[in-house]
Image: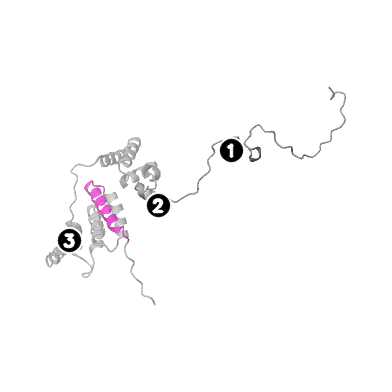
Amino acid sequence: MQSQQSESPPTFLPYLSKRFNSLIWACLDADLHKSAIFYAERYFALDHGNHDARHLYATVMLRANQPHSALHLVNLPPDQHCNGCLEIKSKCCSTLGRNRQAREALDDILKNVTEVPSLSQEQRTVRTFPEEAVLHSRSGLTALKGNLPDQARSSLLRTLALNPMIWEAFEGLCCLGSVPEIEELFPSRPPPIKRTSPDEQLTTRPTQPPVPTATGAGFFTPDTGNAGNLFRKPEPVNALPVRMGRLGPRDSM
């Protein structure tokens, strides 16, 4: 049997991870827990072996008041967990009232304090005031709970127009039965155009056969047999004889 080789991760994964990190933390800072869970699930499913994705997913679940689900993500065997898993585990145990287990997790971290998760070393900017799209989302969801469907629909549509990544607005519009088309929120982009210098255009442009152009000269070009004389009488052509009947009285002059 041939040994199965592990597939190498795609090259775009590091860039996608940065995008997921910034997007999920922005949702957490704005208290958009449903949006944060939605993207954290997909990030973790895409990069299941990445501990940063695991930690972020568990943090989102803990912020969303789901400590049991968060604990399940980081409660790994000793040979698989890291200090990041133990730190989140201690928070989950404290929330659940399991104070002894929380202390044991912290003691395990103190045995090797030099191990620091890579995600905790990154710096990020935290917004002290929510952006306009978040305010529209809160306004729309509040109107939905207050039985104001028209105001809710207007605010939620405005939310997606400003930031189509807010999942709460999608769910609110689904409840109202007014889900916009995907093409309206994410219009298709035109294909990219490669910019080249004039020298590259001359070297890379394929040579094409000359295309005949209609100048009108062919209509006034004399026949080769007329020696250039436009008014020369053409040569008689041997035509078939045509027989005509006898002329009647009305056909005569």
Quick one: SS at disc 1?
Answer: helix
Q: Quadrant of residue 6?
A: bottom left
Q: CA distance from mark 1 to mark 3?
A: 88 Å
Does 42 appear above or below 159? below
Q: Amino acid at mark 3?
A: Glu
Q: Earlier in the sequence, mark 1 or mark 3?
A: 3
Q: Work out which quarter of the rendered image holds the C terminus and state it.
A: top right
Q: Earlier in the sequence, mark 2 or mark 1?
A: 2
Q: Nearer the viewer, residue 208 or 158?
A: 208
Asked whether 19 falls inside the magenta stretch, the response is yes
Q: Work out which quarter of the rendered image holds the N terminus and state it.
A: bottom left
Q: Amino acid at mark 1?
A: Gly
Structural crowding at the residue carrying mark 1, measured as other residues with C-alpha within 10 Å and reported as few (<14), some (14–19) or many (≥20): few
Q: Which residue is mark 1?
A: 218
Specify the principal SS of the magenta part.
helix
Identify the magenta region.
Answer: 10-32
- Which residue is rendered at x = 65% and y = 37% of the image? 226
How many marks are shown on the rendered structure?
3
Structural crowding at the residue carrying mark 2, measured as other residues with C-alpha within 10 Å and reported as few (<14), some (14–19) or many (≥20): few
Looking at the rendered structure, which numbered label has been put on residue 87?
Answer: 3
Q: Nearer the viewer, residue 42 or 72?
A: 42
**x, y (%) of residue 139?**
28, 38
**x, y (%) of residue 110?**
11, 65
Q: Amino acid at mark 2?
A: Thr
Q: Which residue is mark 2?
A: 204
Asked whether 38 falls inside the magenta stretch, the response is no
Structural crowding at the residue carrying mark 3, measured as other residues with C-alpha within 10 Å and reported as few (<14), some (14–19) or many (≥20): some
Residue 60 visible, this orientation = yes
